[in-house]
Amino acid sequence: MTSITPQERALAGRTILMSGGSRGIGLAIAKRAAADGANVVLLAKTAQPHPKLPGTIFDAAAEIEAAGGHALPVVGDVRNDDDVARAVSAAVERFGGIDAVINNASAIDLSRTDAIDMKRYDLMQDINARGTFLLSKLALPALRESAQAGRTAHVLTLSPPLNLDPKWAGAHLAYTMAKYGMSLVTLGLAEELRADGIGVNSLWPRTAIDTAAIRNVVGDDDMVRFTRSPEIMADAAYAILTSDPRTTTGQFFIDEDALRRVGVTDFSRYSLGAPEDRLVPDFFL
């Protein structure tokens, strides 16, 4: 049991439906929930190994089971309506409902406007903004049932605070639009579902996080020393998912702030070598 656990095995028996999750931050969040004995349903495309990114959805499921949870891998694409509906149905059929949705799947391309290919633009919009909206939308009946049964029903999206400083749109407009689309889902759904007692929040890292995807984008293994491990996001997500959804909703949490709410103030254990004051800040902050 970690230092942030508000009560022992708070997610035991709860069912989480996550987009992506084959690796990186999503898998770390899934394994943290699994340590409580949670059920985790993964919707991801990675049935076969990616040429540049390690791990498949089946590898992730095995890690979740080894961590103490129950895993259900659903091979599918968050861009496909039928695949998303199938994942929602599978979660309800296997585990009896859905207590939390985690919108983790995301695509990144930092190209400037004149350089980005419109297929890449569409990919980011379809996975990030539309995929987040669709998965949340189709899970709403199950989430409402969870809330009505007195369980903690949450939608958690890995997206940044809505920061209208022109710096971010000017740096990588297409990516910014796609990520802010995810954040708008949080803003709107939190208000729409407030009366239902479903917590809807976003979570974003203060610093760069060491993931294979980021290594591929940045292309600099030496930068890893100036990042944090995905476990800080896993612990922060756990703190949100175990909070009261009636009072914790409509917020754009930074990982450090989510942890401070449950008494964690020392983040040095998440660092990968560099001093805290030299860590690379993440986008949008």
Image: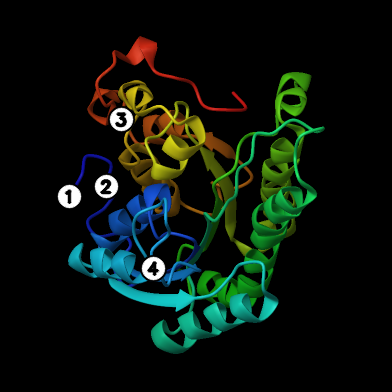
Image position of 81 with respect to 252: above or below: below
Q: Tags 1 and 4 in contact by the CB under 8 Å rule?
A: no
Amino acid type at image mark 1: Met
Q: Nearer the viewer, mark 1 or mark 4?
A: 4
For numbered disc 4, what is the local secondary structure? helix
Quarter holding the C terminus? top right
Return the residue at label 4: 57
Separation (CA) of disc 1 from disc 4:
26 Å
Residue pictured at 23% horizontal, 28% vertical: 269
Image position of 120 with respect to 62: above or below: above
Q: Which quarter of the picture shows residue 279?
A: top left
Separation (CA) of disc 3 from disc 1:
14 Å
Query: If you read the primary sequence from the N terminus, does the residue marked by circle 1 or circle 4 appear first?
Result: 1
The x and y percentages for residue 137 are: 69, 68
Separation (CA) of disc 4 from disc 3:
31 Å
Return the residue at label 3: 264
For numbered disc 3, what is the local secondary structure? loop
Amino acid type at image mark 3: Val
Residue 14 can be seen in this image: no
For numbered disc 2, what is the local secondary structure? loop
Query: In this view of the protein, which residue sits in the foreground, 97 or 120?
Result: 120
Return the residue at label 2: 5
The x and y percentages for residue 21 are: 43, 59
